[in-house]
Image (cartoon, rainbow, N blue to C red):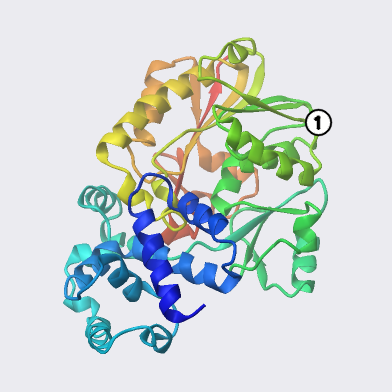
Amino acid sequence: MHPKALLDESASLIEQVFKFEHPADAVVARHFRENRSLGPRERATLSDTVYAVLRERLKLEWLARSGSGSKWRRLAILAFPGDRAFVKSALTEPEKTWLDHCDAVSDADLMSQHRHNLPDWLATALGEQVGDDFDALVASLNQAAPLDLRVNLLKTKREAALASIRQAGLASDPTPYSPLGIRLAGKPSLAKLPAFVEGEVEVQDEGSQLLALLLDAKRGEMVVDFCAGAGGKTLAIGAAMRNSGRLYAFDTSGHRLDALKPRLARSGLSNVHPVAIAHERDDRIKRLAGKIDRVLVDAPCSGLGTLRRNPDLKWRQTPQTVAAQTQLQLAILTSAARLLKPGGRLVYATCSLLPTENEAVAEAFSAAQTGFEPLPVADILEALHVGAANALCAGNAGQWLRLWPHRHSTDGFFAAVWRKKP
């Protein structure tokens, strides 16, 4: 595609995404479906441009003010990836001069909000938690996440999977914390990777793998993944159960559960039972009350721990939407807890960085549900042979799992664990 046409296409796509009516990845995917003539390189350029604008929105909007013409075109020019000579071939002489001027601006010339590129309320909330680590956290959130895989122990072991992946020509290493994880260099296509096609590995962030490990599901048990979504943790739990027992994958979205089906087929699991529910008080849940050994509640949340993958969330979420989520999170956790039999384990998790969705919900549950005993996450991780367990935890005696992108190179995750008293 000619540089001018590609630049125009980028500007159009940025305008669509910035309506914030739908998640950015859904808007980009729809655009590609509607424009199937776009080749892999064009799609990669368009996607990279859109996500660069989302990550550095405040900085790029500030720089764009000094230019002329369409705002969306100016943003596309500033964020366009690769060699400047390519994009300049589509620019007028005044635009080239303007771009050179923008490129000469250094971080020292920027105000703080143009360096961190976060809405004020979120910058304040994160700064209060990490203090002097704020700049490191922001830098990590503005980088693309690595591609992590989880080894399916039903089919292979990590050493064998690593050997297979390397034999296919992909650079890869074991993840530092999860004993099941492999981290790939770059973002290679997995469509023809034998280990992926045969179900020996599945895409899953290392932090998400640790959440599934915390449940510590055993052979022959009755287990519930209460908010299963597309099933990444469901697959990990099913493999931990060695394809035995019964694993219910609950979700209010049948569409998300449909996305689990091809992954389930590839995994070789037959103990997983996807169930679409209307809400957390659905009658199908009530019938299982007091019968379940372990429950994972990966609750709906702001998703602000996944900004490396979903930078649009920082512009779509507000203090009001977060406050509404916390009420739902506690309601879901309370309902899910009713499923457990005495001695059963409950895990509450989010992919949020905010205490209001994490520690505050866990503490509210503990205060209201005296029949549940909190379990220190650090002790569980050490028993599972997870390296540097204490470094992954926060609170007294390693009470909670607290993962940070800048410290652990994972998405931002939180988890709390309880045992139902006899």
The front one of 85 and 306 is: 85
Q: Residue at x 78, y 51 (%)?
A: 199
Q: Is residue 9 above or below residue 416?
A: below
Q: Is residue 327 above or below residue 102?
A: above
Q: Give the number of callouts.
A: 1
Q: Is residue 291 above or below residue 200?
A: above
Q: Residue at x 55, y 40 (%)?
A: 379
Instruction: Say which quarter of the image contains residue 263.
Output: top right
Residue 376 image point, x, y percent: 50, 36
Instruction: Kindly identify the amino acid type of the residue bearing the numbered disc 1.
Output: Ser
Instruction: Say which quarter of the image contains residue 34.
Output: bottom right
82 horizontally vs 245: left or right: left
Q: Secondary structure at mark 1?
A: loop
The front one of 374 and 198 is: 198
Residue 188 image point, x, y percent: 64, 68
Q: Which residue is mark 1?
A: 244
Q: Quadrant of the C terminus?
A: top right
343 horizontally vs 199: left or right: left
Q: Is residue 109 above or below residue 122?
A: below
Residue 299 image point, x, y percent: 48, 33
The front one of 201 and 71 is: 71
The front one of 363 and 262 is: 262
Residue 184 image point, x, y percent: 63, 66
270 horizontally vs 303: left or right: right
Instruction: Say which quarter of the image contains residue 17.
Output: bottom left
